[in-house]
């Protein structure tokens, strides 16, 4: 049986903001099998094409993101109040059409985000 002592409570205002690169910052809360992130993107910020094993839900709270999905680069614009589901392994890229705040949920947690090896996002060579 799970231990109630393992329950944790978080306030976004108390979670440190990590500046990933100019124009993109994030705050993370992680459990054993899932992760939630607030992602802050300045207008024009680009999340380069990438794919990961993690299933992803992206919920736009403010602003809008243009996604390019899959090898065919299908375009999808996701606006405030909308959610995009990205299955495991699907390549995707995004551009902030406005200053944007989104909430991303990943299962399992993004290990590359936790250990800083997400070079595709940081603009570093892999």
Image: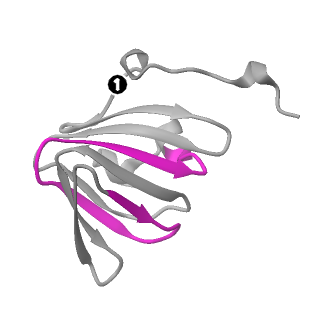
Q: Residue at x 50, y 46 (%)?
A: 112
**SS for dot 1:** loop
- The boundaries of the magenta stretch are 83-112
In this rendered view, identify the residue nearer to me: 85 or 120: 85
Q: Quadrant of the C terminus?
A: bottom left
Locate residue 84: give its quadrant: bottom left
Q: Residue at x 47, y 44 (%)?
A: 117
The answer to whether residue 17 is above or below residue 90 is above
Q: Single out the residue that lies furthest toward the bottom.
A: 72
- Image check: 57 left or right of 110? left
**Total marks drawn?**
1
Q: Residue at x 54, y 58 (%)?
A: 54
* Place of residue 119 in the rendered image (x, y in percent of width and height, measured from the top left): 38, 49
Locate residue 101: give its quadrant: top left
- Image check: 105 left or right of 124? right
* Place of residue 21 in the rendered image (x, y in percent of width and height, measured from the top left): 25, 38
The answer to whether residue 17 is above or below residue 14 is below
* Place of residue 24 in the rendered image (x, y in percent of width and height, measured from the top left): 24, 39
The answer to whether residue 70 is above or below residue 123 is below
- Image check: 107 left or right of 71? right
Which residue lies under the disc numbered 1? Answer: 17
As for residue 28 lying within the magenta part, the answer is no
* Place of residue 9 in the rendered image (x, y in percent of width and height, measured from the top left): 57, 20
In this rendered view, identify the residue nearer to me: 119 or 6: 6
Q: Quadrant of the N terminus?
A: top right
């Amino acid at each position: 049986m799970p231990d109630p002592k393992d329950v944790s409570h978080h306030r976004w205002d108390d979670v440190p903001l990590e500046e990933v690169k100019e124009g993109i910052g994030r705050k993370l809360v992680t459990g054993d099998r899932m992760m939630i992130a607030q992602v802050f993107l300045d207008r024009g910020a680009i999340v380069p094409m990438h794919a990961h094993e993690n299933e992803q839900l992206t919920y736009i709270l403010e602003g809008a993101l243009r996604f390019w999905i899959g090898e065919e680069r299908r375009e999808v614009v996701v606006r405030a109040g909308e959610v995009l589901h990205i299955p495991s392994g699907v390549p995707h890229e995004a551009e902030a059409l406005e200053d944007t705040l989104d909430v991303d949920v990943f299962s399992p947690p993004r290990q590359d985000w936790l250990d800083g090896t997400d070079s595709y996002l940081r603009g570093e060579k892999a």
